[in-house]
Image (tube, coloured by chain):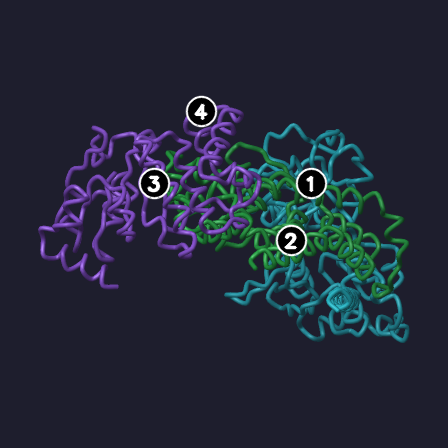
Chain colours: A cyan, B purple, C green
Amino acid sequence: MKKPLRWSVAFVLLAMCLVFTACGGSKSEPTAATGGGSTDTTASGNKDDGGDTAAKGGTLEAIKARGKLIAGVKYDTKLFGLKDPTSGKVEGFDIDIAKALAKKILGDETKIELKEVTSKTRIPLLQNGDIDLIVATMTITEERKQQVDFSDVYFKAGQSLLVKKGSAIQGLEDLKKGVKVLTVKGSTSAKNIREKAPDATVLEFENYQDAFTALKAGQGEALTTDNAILLGMQKQDPNYVLVGGTFTDEPYGIAIKKGDAEFVKTVNDLLKEMKDSGEYDKLYEQWMGVKPE
Amino acid sequence: MVVIIGPSGSGKSTLLRCINRLEKISSGELYVNGTALHDKKIDINRFRREIGIVFQHFNLYPHKTVIDNIVLAPVKVLGLSKEEAAERATSYLSRVGIADKASSYPSQLSGGQQQRLAIARGLAMHPKIMLFDEPTSALDPEMIGEVLDVMRSLAYDGMTMVIVTHEMGFAREVADRVVFMDNGQIIEEGPAASFFDHPREERARTFLSRLIHH
Amino acid sequence: MPGKFDIHVLFNHWDRFAEGFIHTIEASVLALIGSFVLGVIIAVMRISPIRVLNVIGTVYVEFIRNIPLLLVVFFFFLGIPSLGLPLDGFTSGTLGLMVYTASFIAEAIRAGIQSVPTGQTEAARATGLSYIQTMLHIVLPQAIKIVLPAIGNQFINLVKNSSILAVVTGMDLMYYADLINSDTFLPLTVYTIVAVFYLVLTLPLSFAVHYMERRFRSADR
């Protein structure tokens, strides 16, 4: 009597564990999709938009008529666009770029309205005309170029290395056998570093904060991920510095409704002006803690 | 051979257990074999090896065989080799009449056999004194005799023994001296014959008469 | 399709499953031996008549068993290395597991020791055995028999808790499972396979506990 009973209990438990993992599986589906790349979220749909609004007068006229610039920005990204929970103000590098644009077009940097966008919502919002442009850590890709126009590169993002100040590791070529490189489980950064530094030991953590803590505790010699995240860590603790530049290429651009060449030119002119005047460098250093390369 | 008697709760066992300091000596002085037992600085383990004790409830080691119950202390305390200790153990097992049980476990023995084993365990240390704390109180009546026989033979061999017991017949027969206690105090003590025949103290007389009438 | 069960994952990623499984076994066995020895020492300290040892034992048990395992592991993974003694993920995870489990084993053994009748100690001490000899030869062997099922349960917990190594890059089964999952996006498959690996370790332990419980129950008769 006893034995079959015990086996049936074991079976039920196993079945339960299957059901639970199944639930976990279906839940993680959307995350898997975003992790796979935000590019595909808008690949379908929005065909109706095309470029017909751009044809009528263009964005620049619309802004001037309205008297304010509506910019799609992130509210949750350190250094670029982050809402301060106490003051309610949104601040960051992207925000300041958008403000400079408002000043250039309307002569006043306060004539601006910020709208929160996410990687998923930003392209539809732009195509619907809800926002005039996107300044939201958006990487320029060929796929996206089918749907929007991009300005010149305003931030050179890419995977980089964070090491302790004075470390012998100064770039990818120093990641030899026995060197421990820390990153986050299952991230693109983990795949990239395995390819680019096959001899190094890659240790993967639950999240970036854990990985950074482990780096500080001496559990590894370098931490690798997007430089935007690493710059935030460097700002948080100046004893750690970025080295070796970026070894993947993810340039950020300002997205504008497709077909509005006039507005693209306006934005590009402004970026050039800012770079020439040194204003860009000033903003960059203010937010990233270091001068642009 | 000294027998300690008295009503229950009179402190007999406590007095006995003070002799090897199983009870803490909170005040006063106690000398045993010339050792000041109340002195906390003495090496109590060294002292105790010279005094064997047999308990009311045997306190045999249930996880060890009969022979291992005996061998443990001679090996660990006296530093005997395992062979020497086993030889010694076997001879004492024969002496108490359970040599054939050497490889059994205590739980396979009768009460009387268990208590005889406990006695053998004490003797194997070659103690100068043997203490017995009501050694027959937990035994079925038919087994009391076999334990008393062993103790009697020890007495005839001249072993120094201190016994707490309710077996008055046995006490009278083998005791040299009797200590009568009541309420934690020694009321009367003296040679066995004179104590049993002419107790001086009233309380001793009452105690004895009550026992006889039972 | 994350909900799909695809057994090929097991074969395609066999080397990583196997490596993780071996590390899980290593960590479990090392922590098991260590926590048992440490647990016995702490238990003896807790009931020792020497006050200092007593206090140390009590503080150890009450402190360690009342904080999360993750904290204990982080202490070894992040705390100790920052003091200049580098411990990798596997070592710190195993040490944390050992120290943590020892507090529970110490409690089980203490209960076992206290369930051994005092007459046993008295009989042993009366023959001149020292406190430690008495513990070693008389009290502990009896106590451990009594608490073996409880200790067995702690060992089952230990094997399961070894998944904490995944958090500190201890290269155990769970660590590789997370990595395989992020490569395949087949969580149902990956974690079911992992569950079976854990069951391979814990079910025999569980049956052993049942067997011991049954045997001691019949021995009591």
Q: Residue at x 57, y 55 (%)?
A: C150
Observer-side mark, 1 or 3, equals: 3
Q: Residues within 10 Å of mark 3 (few under 14, many from 20)?
A: some
Is C106 situated left or right of B51 in this image?
A: right
Within the image, what quadrant is residue A115 found in? bottom right
> What residue sits right under mark 1 in the picture?
C26
Q: Residue at x 72, y 42 (%)?
A: C23
Q: Position of residue C8 (x, y in %)?
A: 90, 54
Observer-side mark, 2 or 1, equals: 2
Observer-side mark, 4 or 3, equals: 3
Whether residue A214 appears in this view of the structure is: yes
Is A47 situated left or right of A250 in this image?
A: right
Residue type, numbered disc 3: Arg
State the mark number for residue B152. 3
Observer-side mark, 2 or 3, equals: 3
Q: Nearer the viewer, residue B48 or A186?
A: B48
Q: Nearer the viewer, residue A179 or C97?
A: C97
> What residue sits right under mark 2 in the picture?
C156
Q: Secondary structure at mark 1?
A: helix
Q: Nearer the viewer, residue B38 or B189?
A: B189
Q: Which chain letter goes with mark 4?
A: B
Q: Residue at x 36, y 51 (%)?
A: B136
Nearer the N terminus, badge 4 or badge 3? 4
> What residue sits right under mark 4 in the picture?
B79
Q: Secondary structure at mark 3?
A: helix
